[in-house]
Amino acid sequence: MTPATVDAVIRGLKKAGVSIACYLPDSLFRPLYPALDADPDIRTIPVTNEGEGAAICGGVFLSGKRAVLVMENSGLRASVEPLARMGLGAGIPVVMLMSYRGELGENNWWAIPHGITMEPVLQALRVPYAVVREEEEIERTIEAAYASAYASYYHTAIVLGGRLVR
């Protein structure tokens, strides 16, 4: 991630009214975490697994604030149960910001399954998502994801791919 991409993500989150970011660090988003930690307007909560992060973000929604779950797309599989319960069962939205591991051009064998399973899992959960590959689309897509999530009381996902994370 370039510094400009990091800045665009943080601007988008702030425009969307996000005050809490839960994250499980991954290497593609490595430059984002210190920037989130340093931002005085966003409280960060590192988590031990993505399911825990989803649950915390759901609790943040119930408190009247806005949160984001920042993770590698592999974390989607780890968070399916809390996402299904909150979204399908209770109308508690979680907005996810994911890096796209396993996208075409991936050079790590272990990451290929993440790319193969991400979109089918999102579709199985009926989660609207956007794959963003251009920096100028980041802020607008983050704002749109929050507008949809909070209008529908259901999850949304923003996936950063391509040169944005490589």
Image (spheres, grey):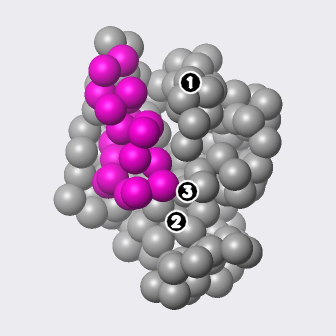
- Measured from the top left, where is residue 62 in percent x and y? 37, 35
Q: Which residue is mark 3?
A: 99
Q: Which residue is mark 1?
A: 7
Crowdedness near tag 1: few (<14), some (14–19) or many (≥20) residues, C-alpha within 10 Å: some
Q: Name which of mark 3 and mark 2 comes first in the sequence.
A: 2
At 70% across and 73% down in the image, what residue appears? 105
The secondary element bearing badge 1 is classed as helix
The residues bearing labels 3 and 2 have C-alpha atoms spaced at a distance of 6 Å
The residues bearing labels 2 and 1 have C-alpha atoms spaced at a distance of 21 Å
Q: Name which of mark 3 and mark 1 comes first in the sequence.
A: 1
Q: Which quadrant is home to the N terminus?
A: top right
- Please state the extent of the stretch shown in magenta in the rendering: 21-39
Can residue 120 be seen here? The reply is yes
At 51% across and 87% down in the image, what residue appears? 109
Q: Quadrant of residue 59?
A: top left
Q: Does 158 sit left or right of 25 as displayed? A: right
At 25% across and 38% down in the image, what residue appears? 45
Q: Which residue is mark 2?
A: 73
The residues bearing labels 3 and 1 have C-alpha atoms spaced at a distance of 16 Å
Q: Nearer the viewer, residue 96 or 162?
A: 162
Q: Is residue 18 above or below residue 129?
A: above
Q: Does 27 sit left or right of 160 as displayed? A: left
> Label 2 near label 3: C-beta < 8 Å?
yes
Q: Is residue 102 above or below residue 94?
A: below
Mark nearest the camera among 2 and 1 is 1
Q: Quadrant of residue 125?
A: bottom right
Tell me the tag on residue 161. none
- Measured from the top left, where is residue 56 in percent x and y? 30, 46
Q: Nearer the viewer, residue 132 or 105?
A: 105
